[in-house]
Image (cartoon, grey):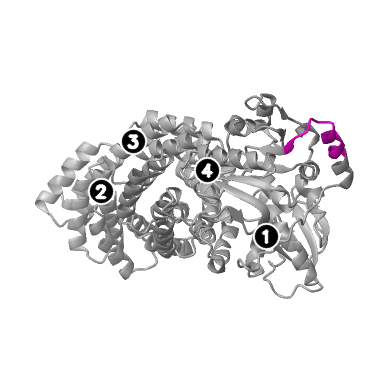
Amino acid sequence: MTLQQAHEAASAEHRAGRLDSAQRIYEQILQYQPTHLDTLLAAARLNHQLGRIEHAIEYMRRANVIAPDRTDILANLGMLQAMTEHFDEALPTLRRALAIDPNLPEVHNNLGNVLRRKGDLAGAIAAYQTALQQAPNYADALVNLGIGLVSANDPQAAIPVLQRAAGMAPDNVDVRVNLGEALRREGRGAEAIPLFQAAMVKRPNEAEIPALLGQALIGVGDVRGAIEAYQRAVSLNPNHAEALSYMSVAYAIANDLDAAYQAAGRAVQIKPISGEVQNNWGHILQKLGRADEAIAAYRESLKLTPHYPEPQNNIASTLWDTGRFEEALAEMHKASAMSPGHAAIDANLGMMMLTLGDFENGWRVYEARLEVIPGVLDKQTARPRWDGSNPAGKTIVLESEQGFGDSIQFARYVPMLAARGARVIVQCQPHLQRLLQTVAGVAQIALADEPLPEFDAYARMLSLPGLFNTDFATIPASVPYVSADPRRVIEFRERLAAEPSGIKVGLAWAGNPVHGNDRDRSIAMQALAPLAKVPGVRFFSLQKGEASRQAQSPLSDATVTDWTNDLTDFADTAALVQNLDLVITIDSAVAHLAGALAAKTWVLVQYVPDWRWLLNRNDSPWYPTMRLFRQSIKGSWNEPIAQMAESLRDLAAGR
């Protein structure tokens, strides 16, 4: 039998599936003729089929020595080397094939896979794109390009690629998972959730998919669902450090700090070399008030991921929370320098500057918040933002943002804008409609869900201080600039006249519970009990929402009169406030309402204040009739409430 006849016999055995027999004949041929190229290639294919990849590589290397310029041999050798994670060998092999013939889309695709595994995402993406230029319907390259773009954190580019890939490869679970992750990162978590859920059905034992589902659920506010998803991931893989770490953050959002501490602690034990795990561990420690330990965890995270700005930002925020304001500012500047244009970090930096009284730089830097939380008009109109240029003869829409109090505080700029010749439309929440209509210069009030008339430009209300170059000397602090319906004022005056005599004090003790810092600023009504010991004082609730129920219980030995069912909006509350002698409140919308009405107002301010209350002063340049009572110990209201009680005693006694 000749060598060729032997090779044909082995090939027949190979085609018939009698692989052991084929392998014996191939080896016999190669013992007699080690350079028989066709047999080397056939033996490589057979060993690949058997999963003996290292043997396949050896046969292919021998074939490459005999035919060094055959691109099919180089392509297959490079593919096999990549399969065994011999990436440093695969890379020059694949590049050699492309140097001989650059028009090999499969080789470009495999090169992209090798580059992606080596961390060269830009190179991988370029390789996949080249493959698709040569073969536009090459499904594998399309899938890999989408995955590469997700890995490169370019979800906007990844989404259309993966959507097309899903149409070409409808059963590819990786496509669905990566498309879901791209959608999640683009803030489209609601669209991502069903993709992850479908992938979990296909791969019920893969822990990574429920971990990603948890991230998407967190993004849409389903904290309990997220925790359940993370628990499933951990049940499938108890050492899934990332799932444990994410779960700790979810527990913290749910205010279950014990569970958060346990999950984060397990995560950091399993994977202490993960920058993200260390960062989340620091987050939980910060929540628990263990500032020095939190900073140490953030610094470890920063060491592990030196170009990741989040831990640097968190170091700054932790220092800020402990009252080390100048140190915090310096650290936040570092975070901003690490990631130029990072909107969330710059917004935090801007708030720090404003708190420290640096209005000149603070207003400018704080504009970064516009990129963090786009407004309604940012999404709905092609009209430009007003840039502070001459507005005469133009219609300007002012869009409310953030809380009710912010809208009330910065409505003071409407008269200034109108005085420069603008027609001003204020877009606001329904509860503010009647109140803000009383501001001088307001031509029209528009609600967010109503169509707007023609306008020339728009601005967010918190941008107005910067647009008017506000400093301490030019804060528009003339009050009142809002007013109540005179008829409602008379109604409440008559009702109050029927009440027992005494100093009439309005109370508000809780803010919006969804506010990010509400836990530190809101109190229980009973915390104000020292005020009730002052003789000659009558208390009236100004508290709305769930916390208003507390007014049904006596405040120490005093009754709190509750007419809040008759307060349908801020205009009604204003009518009651205008009949009171004093308003006592935490940092909430009521504080801004009372200050804007020029009512005597005392505000309880937390240890780390909101930026508008500045530092180390008991007055506010924004509201001349306001007095601030500050915490001197973080978390303790005893001292400022005691000071407030003593001042109330003086007021009641006419001192």
**Disc 1 target residue:** 460
Of mark 3 and mark 2, the one earlier in the sequence is: 2
Query: Horizontally, is 655 left or right of 350 in the view?
Result: right
Q: Nearer the viewer, mark 4 or mark 3?
A: 3
Tell me the kind of residue under disc 3.
Gly
**How far across and how far down the image is residue 555, in percent?**
64, 27
**How far across and how far down the image is residue 537, in percent?**
70, 34
For image coordinates 70% across by 74% down, the residue present is 389
Of mark 1 and mark 2, the one earlier in the sequence is: 2
Q: For the magenta stretch, what is the residue range?
A: 491-504
Return the residue nearer the eye: 67 or 105: 105
Q: Tag on residue 170?
A: 4
**Disc 3 target residue:** 265
**How far across and how far down the image is residue 21, in percent?**
20, 38
**On screen, residue 363 above or below 594:** below
User: Outermost residue toward the bottom?
Assistant: 390
Q: Quadrant of residue 65?
A: bottom left
Q: Tag on residue 84?
A: 2
Q: Residues within 10 Å of mark 4 (few under 14, many from 20)?
A: few
For image coordinates 54% across by 64% down, the residue present is 362
